[in-house]
Image (tube, rainbow, N blue to C red):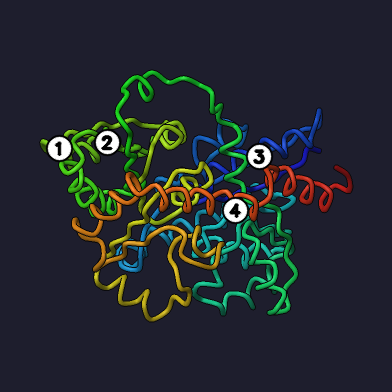
């Protein structure tokens, strides 16, 4: 009888890392039959998983969006539980996405199904009470940020640091690949990364575009996410001289002299490639009020959290205005000492996260735990 695993990722970044993990698990199987059923996206499907629900139908951002879409979310949880029972996997592997995945972890544990969790929920930022649930229902937790291992240990939970999977994703891209669409224009390039969700694009992109006219000798390019229709970006352009390049974010960041990046995984991707950046965030009033009450960390960007100090400037809410963004971009482009200091800090950040191989490490641990060999 073949081996069966169930993998759940609810966002684009989780699908990317899930794809690498599924590929590594398939390698461990060798000639043996391994069926992987998944909630994820194109990367997981390309790696050989049968994707039964795409993350496009799962990604709800912020407190208010979750409340507005609660019936759909609860319906998805019910459908997922039923599908797990029908599939009868040897184990489930959950990737981040805690609001959904911790409910599934509790359910799977009650059914006697082994639970692996890859990429910890950010319980160190808020909802620390989830640690008790994780300790009770998760069999193995694999963390990707170096400080998380000690943080969990202080609360009586043993976890394993496996390195950061973005290092795998970045290593897979050929840095020497000459993409004429990116490299042909000789002007200094500024990359704009407004996000991959419709609501954040509509909020963040107009502010980013406000600086373009102040830098007429530079080329501005919006890095489009493949899962987002181009019109979502172009509808914000108006007469602003800006380009859109979709699905080639790493190539753009390697070419870019600087980047303006919406808070999220992309801030760390930009940092690991070594591009000087400013981190931008502006949320709805209710979301920000709740965040200030409940989130307990001094920074919003992973770059600064990992380094334990401000390496990249965070322009949040009231500070996210055209004049502040323009001044920071001017520093990133023209203040040589500032640029070099940031680039040195970004090299230190990369060293802190170790080398590539997170997906391989997790696949090894899962395979050995379930099947007794690697």
Q: In the visual, does 244 lie left or right of 27?
A: left
Q: Are marks 2 and 1 in contact (CB under 8 Å)?
A: yes
**CB contact under 8 Å: marks 4 and 3:** no
Helix, strand or loop under label 2 = strand
Q: Position of residue 72 (x, y in %)?
A: 38, 58
Q: Which x, y percent locates residue 179?
A: 43, 21
Label 2: few (<14), some (14–19) or many (≥20) C-alpha neighbours in 10 Å: many
Q: Residues within 10 Å of mark 3 (few under 14, many from 20)?
A: many
Query: Disc 3 designates what residue?
Result: 22
Give the Cα separation between the discs numbered 3 and 2.
Answer: 36 Å
Pointer 2 residue: 220
Name which quarter of the figure residue 117 lies in.
Answer: bottom right
Tell me which residue sits at (31%, 70%) in the image.
Answer: 287
Identify residue for label 1. Answer: 240
Q: CA distance from mark 2 to mark 1?
A: 10 Å
Q: Which mark is residue 348?
A: 4
């Amino acid at each position: 009888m073949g081996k069966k695993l169930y993998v759940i990722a609810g966002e684009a970044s989780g699908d990317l890392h899930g794809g690498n993990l599924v590929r590594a698990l398939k390698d461990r199987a060798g000639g043996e039959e391994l069926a992987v059923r998944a909630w994820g996206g194109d990367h997981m499907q390309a790696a050989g998983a049968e994707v039964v629900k795409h993350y496009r139908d799962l990604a709800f951002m912020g407190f208010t969006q979750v409340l507005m879409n609660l019936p759909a979310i609860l319906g998805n949880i019910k459908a997922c539980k039923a599908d797990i029972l029908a599939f009868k996997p040897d184990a489930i592997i959950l990737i981040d996405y805690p609001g959904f995945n911790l409910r599934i972890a509790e359910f799977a544990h009650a059914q006697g199904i082994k639970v692996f969790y890859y990429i910890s929920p950010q319980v160190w930022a808020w909802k620390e009470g989830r640690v008790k649930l994780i300790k009770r229902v998760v069999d193995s937790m694999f963390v990707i940020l170096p400080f998380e291992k000690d943080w969990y240990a202080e609360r009586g939970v043993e976890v394993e640091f496996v390195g950061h999977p973005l290092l795998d994703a970045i290593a897979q891209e050929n840095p020497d690949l000459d993409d004429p669409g990116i490299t042909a224009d000789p002007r200094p390039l500024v990359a704009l990364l407004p996000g991959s969700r419709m609501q954040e694009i509509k909020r963040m992109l107009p502010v980013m575009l406000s600086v373009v006219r102040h830098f007429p000798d530079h080329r501005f390019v919006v890095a489009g996410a493949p899962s987002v229709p181009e019109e979502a970006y172009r509808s914000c352009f108006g007469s602003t001289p800006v380009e859109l390049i979709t699905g080639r974010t790493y190539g753009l960041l390697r070419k870019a002299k600087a980047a303006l990046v919406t808070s999220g995984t992309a801030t760390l991707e930009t940092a690991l490639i070594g591009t000087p950046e400013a981190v931008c965030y502006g949320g709805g009033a209710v979301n920000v009020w709740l965040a200030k009450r409940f989130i307990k960390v001094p920074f919003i960007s992973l770059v600064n959290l990992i380094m334990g100090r401000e390496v990249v400037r965070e322009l949040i809410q009231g500070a996210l205005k055209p004049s502040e963004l323009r001044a920071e971009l001017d520093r990133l482009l023209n203040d040589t000492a500032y640029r070099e200091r940031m680039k040195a800090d970004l090299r230190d950040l990369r060293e802190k996260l170790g080398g590539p191989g997170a997906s391989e490490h997790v696949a090894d641990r899962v395979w050995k735990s379930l099947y007794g060999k690697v």
